[in-house]
Image (cartoon, rainbow, N blue to C red):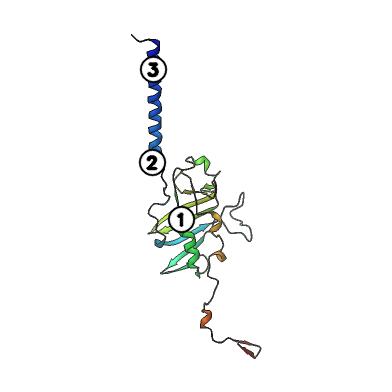
Amino acid sequence: MLTQFHKILIAALAVQLVLAVIVLTRGDDTVALKEHPIIAGFDAAKVTRLQVFAKPAAGADASKPDAGKPDASKPLDLVKHDKDWVLASGFDFPVDQKKIDDALSPIAKLSAAAPIATQAGRHKQLHVADDDFERKLVITAGGKDITLLVGGPAGSRRTAVRLAGDDKVYAVSGLNAYQIGTEPRQWIETAYVKIPREDIAKLVVARDGKTVEM
């Protein structure tokens, strides 16, 4: 015969079983939340083209870009020819290899656990929407294009990023929009010739029929 005391014990046991199930389920989620690469299998050495789109101007007429500002509809087009990079959108002017490395290396290391947003309605808030972003990068590697949308801050030293075609938004470290230049001068090789200082034995300056030798 079940007494009131027995009923209380059974109820307490049921509560303990429910709590145990909740704890075990949370444990499984913890395992699933390990950080993973944002772009699986990305190899910076295989990239042959990088297109950089600037932030679209709010309310701007796309047919009348502001003078002195990058045209958001036209990307900077950086292309690899053999071993060298050139600015294809700027008369194939030589590009500084270090600046390419500085842009691609952080992308290769991007990783995160759970997304900070999974609904398209949050994309504009985080500035990773298809038409509202801080930077849009179209990366060509192995003959395939990867479009990465780089947004605004998403916590302490983290930036919101999203792969085009995917609603999930991640907060990542090591990358922000400001380190990705949108103007040619931020990518090109500014030195016409480089000569090691220790190799220079003499310098002759000629002007108006006169020469100065150092």
**Nearer to me, 182 or 115:** 115
Disc with the residue nearer the chain's start (1 vs 3) = 3
Q: On the rendered structure, is 58 left or right of 98?
A: right
**Picture layout, residue 157 above or below residue 92:** above
Disc with the residue nearer the chain's start (3 vs 2) = 3
* Circles 1 and 2: CB atoms closer than 8 Å: no
Seen from this angle, which residue lies furthest left? 1
> Helix, strand, or loop for circle 3?
helix
- Kindly identify which residue carries mark 2: 31
Marks 3/2: CA–CA distance: 34 Å
Q: Picture quarter containing residue 84?
A: bottom left
Disc with the residue nearer the chain's start (1 vs 2) = 2
User: Which residue is at a point 42% across and 55% down the rendered structure image?
Assistant: 145
- Kindly identify which residue carries mark 1: 107
Tell me the tag on residue 9: 3
Residue 195 lies, in percent from the top left, at: 51, 79
Residue 101 lies, in percent from the top left, at: 47, 63
Label 2, residues with CA under 10 Å away: few <14, some 14-19, many ≥20? few
Seen from this angle, which residue lies furthest right? 208
Query: Hey, what amino acid is under mark 1?
Result: Ile
Tell me the tag on residue 17: none
**Picture layout, residue 121 above or below residue 145:** above
Query: Hey, what amino acid is under mark 2?
Result: Val
> Helix, strand, or loop for circle 1?
helix
Quarter holding the C terminus is bottom right
